[in-house]
């Protein structure tokens, strides 16, 4: 009787797996989106899409990068990037932010964060990428990146980090850019 139940359970599991796998199979009747497979009406010509270039911090001047930051922080930049990296350990930044996209992250990645900050600052209408990073540290719920939730990052860094700490951390983050 036990053996019979085992066989029945195995068959049910197999059928369930078969249903799940078949549900994931692509529909052969759907048209794939590919420049080579675009259906054109008579007389139309296909114009392939052009990718939008990603903003790079390398194209900005120091004034553009630091625009909008409080002057007391600007006066301390460039800070010590190595010390900024060291600050990420006791403040648990690296527990959530990763610099390797192959890992699952809890918070937005820091891989090329300087370049990412340029685009986000532009989208938000901020004066510069350093202001975006600075505000994201001291007021972490002001700008929530799509796909992440608010109230995860501690809201105490404005009290926990000195102005020099913030300058060093910003210097480190601004050094994380595309080669």
Image: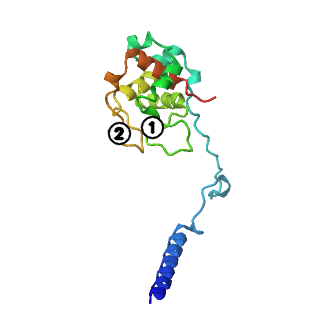
| Mark 1: secondary structure | helix
Q: Residues within 10 Å of mark 2 (few under 14, many from 20)?
A: few
Q: Which quadrant is home to the C terminus?
A: top right
Rendered image coloring scheme: rainbow
Q: Earlier in the sequence, mark 1 or mark 2?
A: 1
Rendered location of residue 152, percent (x, y): 35, 39
36 sits to left or right of 138: right
The residue that appears at 60% across and 40% down in the rendered structure is: 51
Residue position marked by numbered label 2 in the rendering: 152
3 or 104, nearer to the observer: 3
Q: CA distance from mark 1 to mark 2?
A: 12 Å
Query: As displayed, is residue 34 above or below residue 10?
Result: above
Q: Position of residue 2 (x, y in %)?
A: 45, 86
Instruction: Pick the residue in front: 54 or 106.
Output: 106
Q: Is residue 96 visible?
A: no
On the picture, is 91 further left or further right than 155?
right
Element at label 2: loop
Q: Quadrant of the N terminus?
A: bottom left
The image quadrant that residue 138 belongs to is: top left
| Residue placed furthest toward the top | 75
Q: Which residue in the protein does label 1 denote?
A: 95
Q: Is residue 43 above or below residue 126?
A: below
Nearer-the-camera pick, 126 or 80:
80
Residue 148: x and y in percent read 40, 43
Image vertical order of residue 40 relative to residue 86, above or below: below
Say how many tags the image has.
2
């Amino acid at each position: 009787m036990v053996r019979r139940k085992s066989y029945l359970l195995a068959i049910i599991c197999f059928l369930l797996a078969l249903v799940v796998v078949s549900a994931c199979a692509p529909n052969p009747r759907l048209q794939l989106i590919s420049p080579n497979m675009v259906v054109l009406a008579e007389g139309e010509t296909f114009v392939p899409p052009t990718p939008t270039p990603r903003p790079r911090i390398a194209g900005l001047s120091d004034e553009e990068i630091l625009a909008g930051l409080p002057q007391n922080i600007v006066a301390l930049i460039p800070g010590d990037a190595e010390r900024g990296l060291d600050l990420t350990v006791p403040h648990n930044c690296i527990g959530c932010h990763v610099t390797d996209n192959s890992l699952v992250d809890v918070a937005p990645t820091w891989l090329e964060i300087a370049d990412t900050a340029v685009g986000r600052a532009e989208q938000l209408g901020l004066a510069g990428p350093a202001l975006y990073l600075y505000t994201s540290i001291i007021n972490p719920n002001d700008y929530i990146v799509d796909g992440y939730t608010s109230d995860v990052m501690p809201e105490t860094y404005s009290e926990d980090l000195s102005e020099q700490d913030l300058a060093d951390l910003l210097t480190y983050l601004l050094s994380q850019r595309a080669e």
